Image (cartoon, coloured by chain):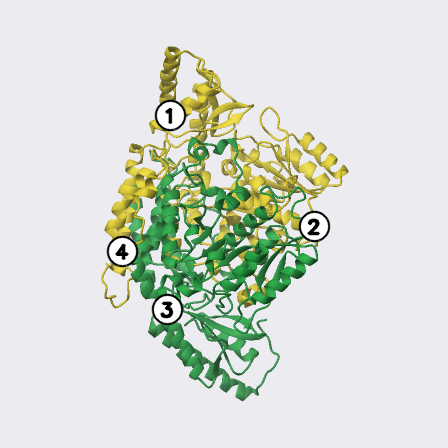
Chain colours: A green, B yellow
């Protein structure tokens, strides 16, 4: 196509014909990939440095044909892929996707607009505003988050960024929109449960709140934040001259899918005048089903909220939906307006410039993929698949509960099952290594009540009953093998801790 | 496809056949879009709220066919698009893209991997590491930024995020990796020129450095930072008990493409022990050409650096390449390790987990598109098109210089021309409004030496000589029209300032 020394008329660009041809090739490659994805080890089995070393050390002086590039995907890249889109992916939380979402990403890439300001593509902003308003209805969120009141929604790359933005808006409200003269002077304090996501700690550190800027609140027997402990700690901190200003509650913690009690936490925040942010990254999606709408009880008292369609709503990473009840607090914290960004539309006050709702300046047209997904599935289709995932996880949990070898660590609220073999931490650690090394499935672990715990999350788009059955079969067989080997080698091996 | 009430065997998912079929349709749609892009007004002409109101107020209960969705792209979305990929887009800085980049985005969307950890897709991390090492050679950057030494590169969403990460790493080094016990106590000070990008102010605010956390340094007659003023101010601040710790120098400012003198600034930073971050978001790309390699003179004294392939290297937004000379400073500032992310590979110390190099936890496989672009064009092809853009801008600048109506505001160093009509601010403001309202091109403005200034940046992938010629023709004709009208209406209209 473009390797000659004498540049063709239009230089080295891919011709429209070549784009059509290779575009089809990539679409077909993806369709073929989904057809054969179960044939690969779910967790990549390459060694550190293997992919890096397989790539040429020098950049190419001359252009290459697209066939060569596509061939290298199979040859060099696929062995280094951990297959998040395999129906046997049960690790972490999913980052599921779907046909309409991939095509939405493609279209966004083709349009190549950058929606930092309303004017730089009004549709990029207004489609996002509309779809995020739709989701308020779909999830049963308070109407005050809607864009036609003082609130509004925006797509962030991730819940980490949403939490950071919420914290910055809350800090702005607690001090002064431009931060206090003294900077944040080490007296501001945020609260989250001991089980809340690591992103809250990262946000506190980024915001420069200092080592004591985050206070972790104790949880109950279901790993949910204890509102009494929260209230007590806020009072103590106030008494010591600190400035409590922000609480992050979680709907579906990463370790165990715990649901913090929003109504009681909301009351504590209201009484104490604190900003309540709700991180529903994983489990918010479930509220699309009326029977899980209870997850959002108490949301009326929240100041901000986020959930991730890129986890469990068939929408490519990255797509986190972030809402604020009072958008002015967010905008005042993040808006900086240089001359070169001034424009008539922004100054009219009639538009949203989403650059002021996020950390980066630029932004992709991410609303397209979300719109495609919602229109393709409809509320009906989304509910169907979410329910199915929960059913499959609950079925797996029953098998665990009925087993003599394994035990449930907690009754799973939704689609995450936390379980362990009864033989102790070292055994479970080794079991997990073998399972993931075997390639037939991918699980991850956590620590619950100081014990090594396996996690199985059902959320990949194409996971069906047969995959969960096969996973349980593999887990049982691998455990049985390991039990036999330990009998031979002499159990227990006690403190052997290869992995932590 | 999926609108029935009785879910088909595999639920509501798009079938593989439908994906292939509609995938081709979207690829063709994009190819057609590029063929007709010049027929649309470059700047969208919709009114605030028009797109929002055109979309249904209620989310769809049932799924819809993909044809309906695609038809709505033409009907509802296109009128609200500002066409960044039009060859008549001369506004801001470009966010140019290309065929191979769009296909790289598509493939990344299809694979749907999330590369937060090395283990969650080794190829996602190692391809990125390799391609970023390539770019060190391509741009003539210091070898200490390479991944095989203490440094390394990573893709960020934008230069805003890169600057924030650099600032956080520098703060960590200046205080304590986990921030000081007191938080950042209002004594830390960053420096950037009065012309540096607004993202530095946003980063300072996010990091909670307080109102006095950023000091703007005076510029010379070419809008470049004055190293003597920097040194003086650092000494003054030290004398007042403040803690200078970070300087952001710019290679290609947004207003005027000014090039800060890195060698002298680097010396000031070295002597004072400050972290030097170089923001080459726009102009770093030019260093691929040996004749512009001088832009990076002095880089040996920098601690971090970023440039944006998503601006001027034919790679879809988002793709900022960010380098640090000492990756440990960055990682110590951003790493938080909960149990659920622990894994054998990370603990071996033999891999990069890029989650610790950025604000969010999750990350897309952005290296694919960058790899596709470099391989498709080769160094040769990239140089060809960069040179061509600079030539076209320089040609435009000569037309302006030779004109009696217009004047250059500064000799353009590369591909950004700052110019104005001699009739004053109000005239230029109205001229810009008319030009952008006419739809044949899109320009933006800035303020230079307190005067309203038009900016024309040549950087869109498909901009050729005929587009720049037509732009100059349109600008002259529109100015002539406006001159005539003002003669009739009685010039000057002095302080009429509709736009600022």
Q: CA distance from mark 1 to mark 2?
A: 51 Å
> Could you say which is closer to the camera, residue A292 or residue A112?
A292
Q: Which residue is mark 2?
A: B175
Q: Residue at x 61, y 48 (%)?
A: B168
Locate residue A283, reporting x and y percent: 44, 63
Q: Earlier in the sequence, mark 4 or mark 2?
A: 4
Task: State yes or no: discs 1 and 3 in contact (Cβ < 8 Å).
Answer: no
Q: Earlier in the sequence, mark 1 or mark 4?
A: 4
Please identify, in this view, whether the residue under mark 4 or under mark 2 is nearer the observer. Answer: 2
Q: Are marks 4 and 2 on the same chain?
A: yes
Please identify, in this view, whether the residue under mark 4 or under mark 3 is nearer the observer. Answer: 3
Q: In the rendered view, would you say B252 is above or below A401?
A: above
Q: Looking at the image, can residue B354 be seen? A: no
Q: Which residue is mark 3?
A: A389
Q: Looking at the image, can residue A219 be seen? A: yes
Q: Chain of mark 4?
A: B
Task: State yes or no: discs 4 and 3 in contact (Cβ < 8 Å).
Answer: no
Q: CA distance from mark 4 to mark 2?
A: 55 Å
The numbered mark at residue A341 is none
Q: CA distance from mark 1 to mark 3?
A: 54 Å
Q: Chain of mark 2?
A: B
Locate residue A95, reporting x and y percent: 42, 60
Q: In the rendered view, would you say A153 is above or below B474?
A: below
Q: Earlier in the sequence, mark 1 or mark 2?
A: 2
Q: Which residue is mark 1?
A: B435
Task: State yes or no: discs 1 and 4 in contact (Cβ < 8 Å).
Answer: no
Task: State yes or no: discs 4 and 2 in contact (Cβ < 8 Å).
Answer: no
Please identify, in this view, whether the residue under mark 3 or under mark 2 is nearer the observer. Answer: 3
Task: Indicate the secondary structure of the residue bearing disc 4.
Answer: helix
Label 4 neighbour load within 10 Å: few <14, some 14-19, many 20+:
many
Q: Which residue is mark 4?
A: B20
> Could you say which is closer to the camera, residue A383 or residue B15?
A383
């Amino acid at each position: 196509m473009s390797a000659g020394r004498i540049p063709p008329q239009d230089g080295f660009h891919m011709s429209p014909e070549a784009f059509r041809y290779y575009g089809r090739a990539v679409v077909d490659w993806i369709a073929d990939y989904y057809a054969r994805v179960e044939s690969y080890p779910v967790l990549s089995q390459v060694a550190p440095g293997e992919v890096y070393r397989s790539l040429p050390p020098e950049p190419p002086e001359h252009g290459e044909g697209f066939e060569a590039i596509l061939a290298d995907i199979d040859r060099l890249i696929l062995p280094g892929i951990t297959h998040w889109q395999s129906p046997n992916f049960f690790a972490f939380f999913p980052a599921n996707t779907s046909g309409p979402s991939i095509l939405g990403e493609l279209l966004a890439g083709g349009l190549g607009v950058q929606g930092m300001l309303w004017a730089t593509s009004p549709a990029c902003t207004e489609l996002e505003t509309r779809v995020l308003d739709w989701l308020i209805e779909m999830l049963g969120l308070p109407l005050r988050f809607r864009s036609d009141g003082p609130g509004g929604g925006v797509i962030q790359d991730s819940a980490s960024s949403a939490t950071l933005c919420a914290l910055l808006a809350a800090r702005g409200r607690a001090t002064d929109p431009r931060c206090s003269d003294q900077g944040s002077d080490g007296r501001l304090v945020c609260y989250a449960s001991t089980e809340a996501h690591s992103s809250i700690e990262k946000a506190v550190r980024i915001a420069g709140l200092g080592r004591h800027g985050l206070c972790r609140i104790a949880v109950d027997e279901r790993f949910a934040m204890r509102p009494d402990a929260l209230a007590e700690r806020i009072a103590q901190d106030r008494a010591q001259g600190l400035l409590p200003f922000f609480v992050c509650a979680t709907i579906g913690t990463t370790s165990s899918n715990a649901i913090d009690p929003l109504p009681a936490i909301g009351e504590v925040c209201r009484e104490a005048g604190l900003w309540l942010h709700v991180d529903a990254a994983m489990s918010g999606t479930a509220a699309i089903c009326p029977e899980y709408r209870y997850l959002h009880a108490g949301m009326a008292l929240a100041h901000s909220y986020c959930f991730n369609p890129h986890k469990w709503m068939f929408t490519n990473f990255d797509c986190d939906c972030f809402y604020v009840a009072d958008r002015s607090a967010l905008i005042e914290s993040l808006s900086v307006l240089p001359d070169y960004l001034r424009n008539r539309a922004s100054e009219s006050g009639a538009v949203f410039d989403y650059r002021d709702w996020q950390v980066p300046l630029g932004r992709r047209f991410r609303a397209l993929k979300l719109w495609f997904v919602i229109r393709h599935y409809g509320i009906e289709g989304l509910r169907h698949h979410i329910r199915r995932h929960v059913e499959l996880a609950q079925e797996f949990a029953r098998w665990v509960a009925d087993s003599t070898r394994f035990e449930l660590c907690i009754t799973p609220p939704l689609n995450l099952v936390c379980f362990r073999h009864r033989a102790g931490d070292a055994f479970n650690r080794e079991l997990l290594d073998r399972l993931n090394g075997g390639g037939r499935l991918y699980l991850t672990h956590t620590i619950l009540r100081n014990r090594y715990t396996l996690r199985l999350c059902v959320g990949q788009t194409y996971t069906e009953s047969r995959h969960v059955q096969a996973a349980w079969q593999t887990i049982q067989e691998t455990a049985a093998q390991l039990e036999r080997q330990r009998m031979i080698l002499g159990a227990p091996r006690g403190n052997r801790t290869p992995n932590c």
